[in-house]
């Protein structure tokens, strides 16, 4: 079967060669070249192969170069703007997450493990914000350079006569700057909200810290009073015992005085009775 297929392929190639010979053409190196029976319409005139002198003029070459510069600058501006907008969106999202974490920190303040977890999340988010801000500054510089390049190439296009390229450059610049300003306003609002929450956290945490310190100092004073109370009680006990002993001695003196008075009265009575 394979042998029959090989014979068939050879027959097809042979038929193709015969047809090419009949039509006055043959293949050389995979290219179909006319050999005979060529009409006038199949030939190429030398006029078509001649170089157009207008396309080699200085004005035309500078015009085409300015158009290429506009296209290259537009591509750079578009790519840098796309990356910059994505970075700014990420930056705004991280700022929103940080605001939520700081508000949560106020709620879990003084709760031990929860406060530590929130604090770790805040530190990690701040690191991501720092990295995102550095990337934002990098592509902001690239966008500024692309903006200058596109503006210059657009002016060059206007000067060289490539009016459409100059208009397109101005439109791209206007669109890019408009999008960037809108996104920048969103970033500024997010940063203002973060500063407001930070001030709120500092104020409330300061009050809670003072309250905690005052409570701790009051507890310390109570402990000091409790530690000093036995000494004061001993002193008071000694004073009370001394007063009690004095009072007891006074009472004893009174009792003895009464006894001595009774004895004197008894002796006088006996003397009176004996004299009678």
Image (spheres, rainbow, N blue to C red):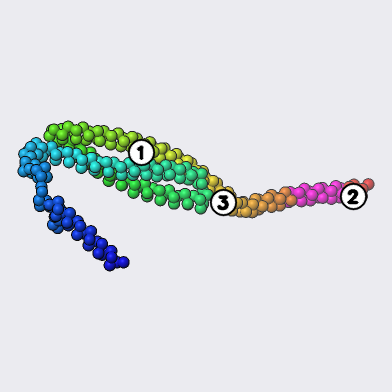
Q: Can residue 235 be seen in this view?
A: no
Which span is picked out in magenta? 249-268
Residue 41 at x, y percent in the picture:
11, 42
Q: Look at the image and tell me in which quarter the N terminus lies.
A: bottom left
User: In this figure, which residue is indicated by the disc labeled 1?
Assistant: 187
Q: How crowded is mark 2: few (under 14 residues within 10 Å), some or many (20 or more)?
A: few
Residue 62 at x, y percent in the picture:
11, 38
- Compared across the picture, whether 156 is left or right of 273 comes to left
Q: Which of marks 3 and 2 precedes in the sequence? A: 3
Residue shown at 14% from the left, 51% from the top: 23
The one nearer the camera, 30 or 121, is: 30
User: In this figure, which residue is indicated by the disc labeled 3?
Assistant: 224
- Compared across the picture, whether 82 is left or right of 26 comes to right
Q: For numbered disc 1, what is the local secondary structure?
A: helix
> Is 89 within the magenta?
no
Looking at the magenta stretch, what is its main secondary structure? helix
Residue 72, placed above or below residue 231: above
- Compared across the picture, whether 255 is left or right of 60 comes to right
Q: Residue 270 carries which label?
A: 2
Q: Which mark is residue 93?
A: none
Residue 105 at x, y percent in the picture:
48, 45
Residue shown at 14% from the left, 35% from the top: 156
Contact flag, marks 1 and 3 (Cβ < 8 Å)? no
């Amino acid at each position: 079967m394979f042998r029959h297929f090989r014979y068939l392929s050879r027959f097809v190639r042979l038929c193709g060669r015969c047809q090419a010979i009949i039509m006055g053409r043959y293949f050389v190196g995979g290219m179909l070249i006319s050999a005979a029976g060529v009409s006038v319409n199949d030939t190429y005139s030398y006029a078509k192969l001649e170089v157009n002198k207008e396309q080699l003029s200085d004005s035309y070459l500078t015009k085409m170069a300015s158009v290429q510069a506009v296209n290259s600058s537009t591509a750079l501006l578009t790519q840098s703007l796309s990356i910059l907008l994505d970075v700014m969106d990420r930056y705004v999202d991280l700022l929103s997450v940080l605001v939520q974490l700081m508000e949560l920190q106020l709620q879990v303040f003084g709760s031990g493990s929860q406060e530590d977890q929130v604090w770790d999340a805040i530190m990690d988010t701040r690191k991501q914000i720092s990295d995102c801000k550095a990337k934002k500054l990098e592509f902001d510089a690239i966008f500024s350079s692309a903006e200058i390049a596109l503006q210059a190439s657009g002016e060059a296009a206007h000067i060289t006569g490539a009016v459409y390229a100059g208009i397109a450059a101005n439109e791209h610049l206007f669109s890019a700057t408009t999008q960037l300003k809108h996104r920048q306003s969103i970033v500024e609002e997010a940063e203002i909200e973060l500063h407001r929450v930070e001030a709120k956290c500092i104020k409330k945490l300061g009050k809670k810290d003072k309250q905690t310190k005052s409570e701790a100092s009051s507890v310390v004073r109570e402990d000091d009073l409790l530690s000093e109370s036995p000494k004061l009680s001993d002193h008071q006990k000694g004073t009370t015992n001394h007063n009690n002993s004095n009072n007891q001695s006074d009472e004893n003196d009174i009792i003895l005085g009464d006894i001595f008075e009774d004895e004197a009265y008894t002796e006088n009575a006996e003397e009176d009775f004996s004299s009678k």
